[in-house]
Amino acid sequence: MSDYFYRYMLSDSRNAPLGTAFMESDPDAATWRLRLKPEDLLNVLEHEVINLIAMDEGRPDMIGRILSSNHTDTIEVEPLNEAGVRLRQNLRVPVRFESFLYPVNGTWTGRLPIVCHDLSCGGIAFFCNYALNLTEIVEVVVPITSQPLILHAQILRLRPSNSNIPLYAATFVDLIHDEEVLLREAVFSQQITNRDTRK
């Protein structure tokens, strides 16, 4: 049995989710053997080039080319080049949940109710019926991860919206690795749920 069990999320060139996989080969090898869930294999094999988004600390995100498959649960992939941090930040999903903001350096006190509009590995967009200051830091509760997260976020801008309630965009700041992993898993899981619901 292989000693390598690095976890990856697989997506296509448009960042649409394809499935999850475990690496079963030396990460320095010229080709990687990845084991998938059988139900994800058909989605993956529709593509030649895929994104590999690392779930484990110290592993880079990669762009890879599918070379072969056993047509059951394994593919051979040639890593082409590192994808850079933007790949995981572009994992964004529309998702609605109610939550709260808490002040860090703002002039208000207490907590503010929000409704999430979309979530990514790099930030969150939410409706809030309160005038927040751009660049202020808030704490936001993200309840859809396997363990609810309380994350620091910086308010970036107001986004266009058809709602009477302001729609804010914020970027997460000072994330630790475990928080990043939980966010990636939650966003990716929600993307797959949305994909399967549309079928």
Image (spheres, rainbow, N blue to C red):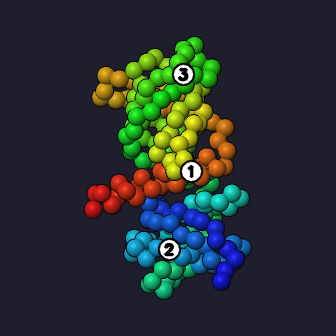
**Residue type at tag 3:** Leu
Kindly check if marks 1 and 2 are in contact, taking CB atoms under 8 A apart as contact: no
Residue assigned mark 3: 134
Cα separation between marks 1 and 2: 20 Å
Q: Quadrant of residue 195?
A: bottom left
Q: Can residue 159 be seen in this view?
A: no
Image location (x, y in percent) of residue 50: 50, 67
Residue assigned mark 2: 36
Q: Nearer the viewer, residue 185 or 155?
A: 185
Above or below residue 70? Residue 23 is above
**At x 67% / y 44%, what residue is drawn?**
176
Q: Residues within 10 Å of mark 2 (few under 14, many from 20)?
A: many
Image location (x, y in percent) of residue 119: 46, 42
**Residue type at tag 2:** Leu
Q: Nearer the viewer, residue 190 or 79?
A: 190
- Please state which of the two labelled residues, at mark 1 or mark 3, is closer to the viewer: 1
Label of residue 182 in the image:
1
Say how many tags the image has: 3
Image location (x, y in percent) of residue 43: 39, 70
Say what secondary structure mark 2 lies in.
strand
**Residue type at tag 1:** Leu
Q: Is residue 102 visible?
A: yes
Q: In which quarter of the image is residue 103?
A: top right
